Amino acid sequence: MMNVIIDKDAGFCFGVRNSISVAEELVAKGENIKCLGQIVHNDKEVSRLRALGVEFVSFEEYKNLKNETVLLRAHGEIPETYEIAKQNNLKIIDTTCPIVSSLQKKVLCSWEELSERGGQIVIYGQKEHPEVKGLKAQAGGEAIIVNDINEIFKIDFTKDIHLFSQTTKNKKSFENIIRSIKIEADKNSVQLYSNSSICRQVVNREVSIINMAKTNDVVIFVAGKNSSNGKTLFEICKSVNEKSHYISSVDELETNWFKGIDNVVVTGSTSSPLWLLEDIKEEILRICI
Ligand code: SF4
């Protein structure tokens, strides 16, 4: 009989869990709340919250709101979001993750220091990710964003560099980027200060996922299609266990993945809800009987 387990360390990180529970509490009290952007990069969870009464608005829609209550998610916001809130009399429920807030402050401090002597802020991350947009805004919108090692040519190696990372990036890839930037910085005698800003929750999840992928025959990795953390963790999973499959919903499961298999683990990113992992486990057992 095939054994299917759920990774005991899977589920939301505390930042996302906090945003979601605040949203749930508010709608349970009958409050009419709007959330700016997707609260989590997982369509299934967003649909569940929408059904409970949480309304999601884009930044364009947000700009036109007046006298409303708006929840800010864990990823952090740009300063303009708070300015609009003041102008439009919006009540803000700010659930920015404290780790992201602290990182924003560090970027701002670095920017203030560097702008006096002509240095630059570099952020290792995805330029369209809300957290990265929030960090870039702290540097007057002038931070250089590099998403992989091939993009370090964007950096001006005649100026000092303060390097930060999006909290959900892969630690090893960040270390490789630091090494490559350092080589170029040394050649030009410019200073490189790197700030290890990858979240502990993500690093710990990497360790646990490697362990799960090594000790099970098949890994079912659950994450939203646009989850940055999901893509990073899945790459790790796949590098350890070839039989790793990335899915976002129950109907993407394929029965042939489980033929002749003894042990299966269902795991996911820091933005994958546990209830979805449970549903997937049940469906695997159903289709394999
Ligand atoms: S991954 Fe870490 S920094 Fe990002 S929201 Fe979750 S707890 Fe906060």
Image (cartoon, helix red, strand yellow):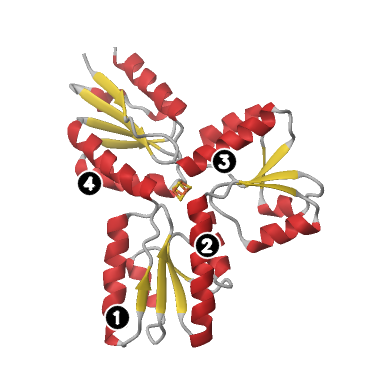
**CA separation in Å, label 1 and label 4:** 29 Å
For residue 239, the mark is 4
**CA separation in Å, label 4 and label 2:** 32 Å
Amino acid on which disc 4 is placed: Ser
Amino acid on which disc 2 is placed: Gln
Quadrant where the C terminus sits is top left
Which is in the foreground here, disc 4 or disc 2? 2
For residue 19, the mark is 3
State whether residue 196 is above or below residue 265.
below
Q: Earlier in the sequence, mark 4 or mark 3?
A: 3
Secondary structure category for the residue under label 3: helix
Which is in the foreground here, disc 4 or disc 3? 3
Q: Which residue is mark 2?
A: 104
**CA separation in Å, label 3 and label 1:** 40 Å
Residue 62 % position (x, y): 72, 51
State whether residue 170 is above or below residue 218.
below
Which is in the foreground here, disc 2 or disc 1? 2
Q: Which residue is mark 1?
A: 184
